[in-house]
Amino acid sequence: MGKWYDPEMEGFDLGFDAIQPGKYILQVEEGIEKYENEDTGSISLRIPFTAVDTKDEDLEDNIGKKISMFQNIVKKDGKVNKFGEKIVANVLILAGVGEHIDDKFDDDVDITDEDLLEEIKKCLPGRMVIGEIKMGKDMKGNDRPELNRIEKYPKQKPFKPGKKSKAKPKDDESDEWED
């Protein structure tokens, strides 16, 4: 089998360190996608983020770590989850693309509309928000970081349709985004 084969091995660490609880500037990444639970029929939207800055020196080792938000958008009964739809809308607003989405789509469009989802995938990556990470539990009772709160990043540049955002937080000592 080669020199890499170890029949005595019982496990190994994959080297993925979870982001620690705290407050970060988070940048939305490419890879927004829908996930359908084949057993229940429910659908969730995954929005990936990367921590790009923090004002807490104790959390600086977390810069570059990733966290994803999974938001249920279709319930088990196949109906749109209006609460989940509102949460996604709030993320769009806080990331500075809500007005663009609102202008582009009719009021009666819902979160399952494929054109809407494609537009979200085009305009949300690169946008920044302030995110608060807390420790929660997964379905098996294990600790896991969760994106608990999202706020508007005050230094976000205005959204311009058709341009990919290459936003980076400015280095400054401002407390503008701190509590």
Image (cartoon, rainbow, N blue to C red):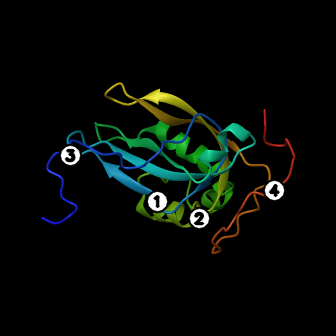
User: Quarter-wise, where is residue 168 in the image?
Assistant: bottom right
Q: Tags 2 and 1 in contact by the CB under 8 Å rule?
A: no
Return the residue at label 3.
Answer: 9
Q: Quick check: can you spot residue 174?
A: yes
Residue 126 position (above or below residue 56) = below
**How far apart are the two marked residues, 2 and 1, measured between alpha carbons?**
10 Å
Identify which residue is drawn at 44% across, 50% down: 46
Q: Tags 1 and 3 in contact by the CB under 8 Å rule?
A: no
Looking at the rendering, in which quadrant would you find the C terminus? top right
Which is more N-terminal, label 1 or label 2?
1
Report the side of 76 relative to 2 (left or right): right
Q: Tags 4 and 3 in contact by the CB under 8 Å rule?
A: no
Identified by mark 2, the residue type is Cys
Residue 143 position (above or below residue 4) = above
Helix, strand or loop at mark 4? loop
Of 91 and 29, the residue lying toward us: 29
**How far apart are the two marked residues, 3 and 2, measured between alpha carbons?**
45 Å
Identified by mark 4, the residue type is Asp
Return the residue at label 2.
Answer: 123
Identify which residue is drawn at 49% across, 51% down: 47
